[in-house]
Amino acid sequence: VRSVQSIADLRTQIANWRRAGLRIGLVPTMGNLHAGHIALAERARELADRVVATIFVNPTQFVAGEDYAQYPRTLDKDSRWFEQAGVDLLFAPPAEAIYPEGPAMQTKVDVAALDGRLCGAFRPGHFPGVATVITKLFNLVQPDLAVFGEKDYQQLLVIKRLVRDLFIPVEVIGHPTVREADGLAMSSRNAYLSADEREIAPQLYASLQRAAQALAAGDVDLAAIGAAGREYLTRLGFKPDYFSVCSADSLEPPRADETDLIVLAAAWLGRARLIDNVRAERPSRPGASR
Ligand code: PAF
């Protein structure tokens, strides 16, 4: 696939497409692609005339002590995969192009309404890093639409909220999580799992599904559902960061009359921090209010 590293080359190509009135779709990634990323590219391919994919291991979204240095960089393979998925242009800039003065000395975008809980509480600074780089990529590529995976549900809501709050004219599209045959959500970080850990990893999804089933069956004790999920995962050898039932719209604790819920969990398994979520529709309770 045609690949550019410089902002000047990217802008030249984008300007040509915009002049021709073409609809541009964007798929931002950190590379080390798996079938989940390819599904995002294929979705963008269906919705847009031209697809731009980005590969940028964004330093500002890694918290101190995380795997920034070790994060696998597999540009040649990724480029071939994007080619097959119908991507028209790959933008893979060096860190200095995106952060010319270094990551510390720059404007930050902070979607405060959604930070501070779930992954935000355990990875302080992560979502401002994501929001900042996505704002930069949206301004550089000026896409009509951008596609993100629903596995990173909080990230998806952060990005939807940032385009709304900052009036960025990009349609943000969520795409369903792609799973292995045994249910494990695809993730670049699954590669960190040992063979034994890989065996039990699908239990994260299984435990979320059970919680969603309990909600659908009318269980109203959300704290007990969360505690049971954490306990189950701990017994199997996970170290859960959280297992929580939230409003699917706001990620706040659900109001009593809210029916559109989501169960989200993050848990360490060996060196891998796995996250996943399952939507849950609960029966409406007549007269229920806050
Ligand atoms: O989901 C990811 O891979 C990253 O967080 C993203 C959206 C590409 C921003 O760096």
Image (cartoon, rainbow, N blue to C red):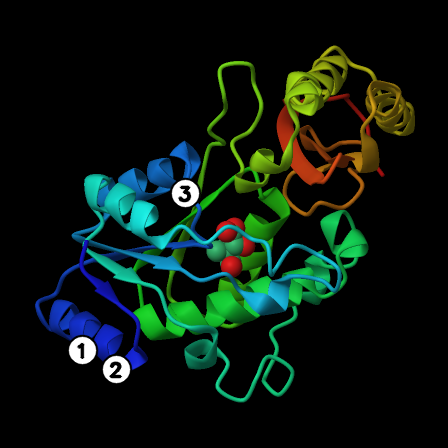
Task: For the residues labelled 1 and 3, say whether their Cβ atoms are less than 8 Å apart.
Answer: no
Query: In which quadrant will I find the C terminus?
Result: top right
Q: Residues within 10 Å of mark 2 (few under 14, many from 20)?
A: few
Task: For the residues labelled 1 and 2, say whether their Cβ atoms are less than 8 Å apart.
Answer: yes
Mark 3: amino acid = Leu
Mark 1: amino acid = Thr
Does dot 1 land on a helix, a strand or a loop?
A: helix
Q: Residues within 10 Å of mark 3 (few under 14, many from 20)?
A: many
Q: Which mark is residue 122?
A: none
Mark 2: amino acid = Ala
- N-term-proximal mark, 1 vs 3: 1
Where does label 1 land, which residue? Answer: 12
For the point 65% across and 61% down, the residue is 62
Q: Which mark is residue 33?
A: 3
Can residue 282 be seen?
no
User: Viewed as shown, does residue 266 lie left or right of 39?
Assistant: right
When the figure is inspected, residue 199 is found, relative to residue 81, above or below; the finding is above
User: Viewed as shown, does residue 269 lie left or right of 20?
Assistant: right
